[in-house]
Amino acid sequence: MLLNILLSLLLILVAGGLIFLALQPATFRVERKRVIPVTPQVAFDGVRNFRTWPQWSPWLMHEPDASLDFSDQSGQEGSWYSWDGKLVGAGEMTHEQLSPAAHIDCRLQFLRPMRSVSRVRFRFQPAQDGGTQVAWCMEGRMPFLLRWMSHKMEGWIGRDFDIGLIQLAMQLGDQRDPMVLEFPGLVQVEAATFITRRYEGSLQAMPAAMRTGYPELMQAVEQAGLSIEGMPVAIYHSINPETGQVCCDMGMPVVEARGMPGFEIVKLPARRYMRTRLRGEYTHLELAWHAAFAQLRMRRQRFRRGLPRIERYVNSPEGLQGLAVETWLDIPVR
């Protein structure tokens, strides 16, 4: 009797799962656009030459020493490049159709970690205010059992396209908002004590709060006669990507801490982190965190949930005022 009940429940669950998958989209489409201050022909030439892709690919940057191979003919219909790496998997991209200064259509085949075929398209159109609008699109079909991923592709791949278009613009000489990402891998960080001030609000309002918060924090620490040891940090306790609300502490590392009115003491124990380095504008921080978690997944490391994520400013958060900053993004791992 009990066995029959369990089997019935299992059948209901399986049937429910199949119905859910049947209702999900069978295809996906992701597109991002960016205006680059070059002519359509220059943008077209920059994309069609596969040998330049390692300099701006949002995936190859995760594994610079991945094995790459290129066809003898480059930038022509039928030309291709392939990659094979421990982190980025293996696959091949082939130019199927090229229309000078207008569009590029490619066939993208993944061999590892799983097999799939998608279509990648680039469109180049003159922008109203000058330059070229580059549109990068990827389309494909999902296997039935993976249809639940269709809705997630926009979030997973869209930000990669944003990063790639920024780096493509840099490759073509546009340095208006540079971004360089580096991945030193696992590091052991020693225990530290911080004098902190809490920020709770929107991601949009956070830069303005930090512009005033860090100078006030540093001044208060110095007036209290505490010795600063290291650069400022931001200690993230929670980030809600749907509402854009964040809770974090602006922190100043000190040798020894004591209570200060209006401020808190936070102690972080020695811990292993997966570290990502951002060099560029603070406005790229969301994309940098996306890349940091992508690196974590590629390395099959598990994020320790419930523990804070840390931004460590290599130079100074004064970069929030428009100067380029160097920031370590630390994700605690098991």
Image (cartoon, rainbow, N blue to C red):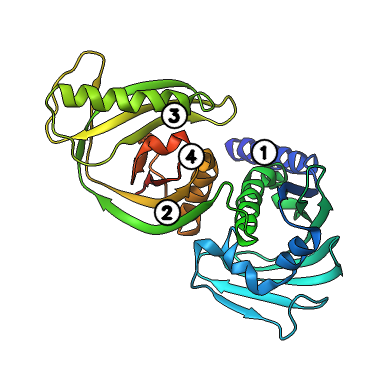
Q: Nearer the viewer, mark 1 or mark 2?
A: 2
Q: At which x and y percent is residue 117?
A: 75, 64
**Residue neighbourhood size for the residue with mark 4, other residues' Cα within 10 Å, grouped as few (<14), some (14–19), many (≥20):** many
Horizontal side, residue 261 vs residue 301: left or right: left
Mark 3 and mark 1 lie on one chain; the one further toward the N terminus is 1
Where is residue 307 shown, x and y percent of the image? Answer: 35, 36
- What amino acid type is highlighted by mark number 1? Leu
> Which numbered disc, 3 or 2, marks the residue closer to the eye?
3
Q: On the image, numbered disc 1 is attached to which residue?
A: 13
Judging by the rendered image, the residue that carries numbered circle 4 is 282
Residue 163's spot in the image, x, y percent?
60, 51
Secondary structure under tag 4 reads helix
Looking at the rendered structure, the kind of residue marked 3 is Ser
The circle drawn on residue 238 is 3
The reply to whether discs 3 and 2 touch (Cβ–Cβ < 8 Å) is: no
The answer to whether one can see residue 309 in this image is no
Q: What is the spatial separation of the Cα atoms under label 3 and label 2, in whole angstroms?
A: 20 Å
Identify the mark nearer the N-term, 1 or 2. 1
- Dot 4 and dot 1 residues touching (CB under 8 Å): no
- Residue at 67 percent of width and 47 percent of height: 158
